[in-house]
Amino acid sequence: MSSVEKQTGSQTTLDSADRHVDRRLLRKVDLRLLPILTGLYLLSFLDRSNIGNAKLDGLATDLHLSASGYNNALAVYFVAYVVFEIPANIILKRFDPQFWLPTLTLAWGVASIAQGLIHNQAGLYGIRFLLGATEAGLFPGVIYLFSVYYRRRERHWRVAVFFGGAALAGAFGGVLAYLIGLMDGVGGRRGWNWIFIIEGIITVAVSLLAYFIVPTWSHSAKFLTVTEREHLLARLREDSDAGNHEQFHWSFVRQALTDHVVWGYALLFHGFSFALYTLSLFLPTIIAGLGFATWKAQLMSVPPNALAAFSIWFAAWLSSYYKIRAPIIIGGALVGIIGYIILLTTKTAGAQYTGVHLATAGVYTGNALLLSWPSENISGQTKRAVGVAMQITIGDIGAIAGVLIYRPNFAAHLYRKPHIITIGYLTFAIAMTTYLWVWMAKENHRRDVLLEQSKEPVPEGEERIRLGDRAVDFRYQT
């Protein structure tokens, strides 16, 4: 055997060994992060959206809500969510996710229990605001935590699995709400009271367990050996800034606030979140409007959400296999639009229920992929933490608009006018995806040419950290 063949064979063996070490390390990280964090998000989505199930069980009637009282209660939640997201992620960056994320979970679990103890509209408004404030830090915090454990091309699949918890919450919540609703009258409380109380107790119990499972930052992760931790940080440094121990500076916050790409991600989610949250909060009501009894509507919300979960995971696999994001996000929006058009143009309950399935699958799938996009393309740890929080904050303003537009006086003809507006929002999301896709592809090409022609060394060390995604050797994932 020639020396070249020996060298090639040796390199192949080395690469194979490295891949084996990587796979084993990723399995260990996945088992520590994904089950608990997906569980927390499932509970978060369940505790914010179960009000839609409670409404069918008599919440609005028992609390004597005004005509717009229910919609205002939904909006109050998102106002608090928007206000507290960026501060929550700044706190996370300065402290420890192992303490911060379970504490948030415990706080919103208590707030959820309190929802089952209220007696009037004012109490509902106050508790919904508190629920929004305490839930605000979980999603952007987890997305940021993923970014310091996984390389860029590995994150979107994990985010998709994590976001699948939202769809599973819708499916699981429908069955759970039906079963808990059978407790109507127990202890002198209505079924909707028990929905909030029991689901809140579950959240509190899981939050106490989470203190012992949610990991800290990757550079001091105790569930990894010293060798595993060094290997994790080395592979992160090769791929992005995630392996660095970056100090907090307000200049990185300013970078996020002035970057048009960060704003593009935020506006993209703004378009999708209008559809996401109106579906998750009004799905039982929309299905009941097709002519089904309340208990059937609770159970019939399960299949669309289950389909959404499978669609998310299939799209994530497709995106990983073909190494694309934008086309699949656009595809999700188009499927959602088709679903809404079927809802608007067909007359039979069966056809309209099919439209519900397509709308739910398309909207949830698009959201799952777009929410991982900034963590792959914003470099600089603090900038990324703020950028992810900005995306959720500005995006959720779309949710506020949605819950106010899906009000009772627009409920005629199965929310015809709100559905048309939703199609407009999804069209806007397609436009923003196209803008980001085209700009990033052009910028990657420009940097390729610049790097090929330039004789200057690629920046390293502190200068590389300062430049982040503006460095000439950084490439956007499209």
Image (cartoon, rainbow, N blue to C red):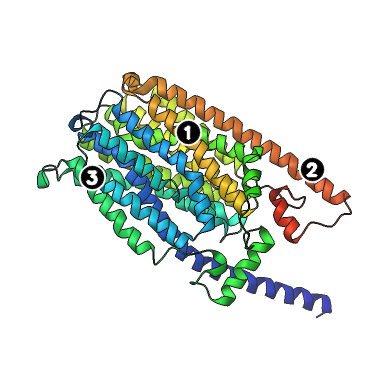
* Left-right relation of 458 to 77: right
Secondary structure beneath dot 3 equals helix
Q: Is residue 58 above or below residue 374?
A: above
Residue 28 in percent (x, y) is at: 50, 68
Q: Are marks 1 and 2 in contact (CB under 8 Å)?
A: no
Q: Amino acid at mark 1?
A: Ile
Q: Which residue does the image show at 45% across and 65% down from the upper left?
A: 32
Q: Earlier in the sequence, mark 1 or mark 2?
A: 1
Q: Amino acid at mark 3?
A: Ile
Q: Amino acid at mark 2?
A: Arg
Tell me the mark number nearer the camera, choosing from 1 and 3.
Answer: 1
Q: Is residue 240 above or below residue 232?
A: above
Looking at the rendering, in which quadrant would you find the C terminus?
Answer: top right
Q: Nearer the viewer, residue 111 or 359?
A: 111
* Left-right relation of 212 to 437: left
Q: Earlier in the sequence, mark 2 or mark 3?
A: 3
Q: Which residue is mark 2?
A: 446
Q: Is residue 355 above or below residue 165?
A: above
Q: Which residue is mark 1?
A: 397
Residue 166 in percent (x, y) is at: 40, 46
Residue 50 lies in quadrant: top left
Residue 469 in percent (x, y) is at: 69, 49
Q: Nearer the viewer, residue 174 or 216?
A: 216
Looking at the rendering, in which quadrant would you find the N terminus?
Answer: bottom right
Q: In the rendered image, is residue 53 in sight?
A: yes
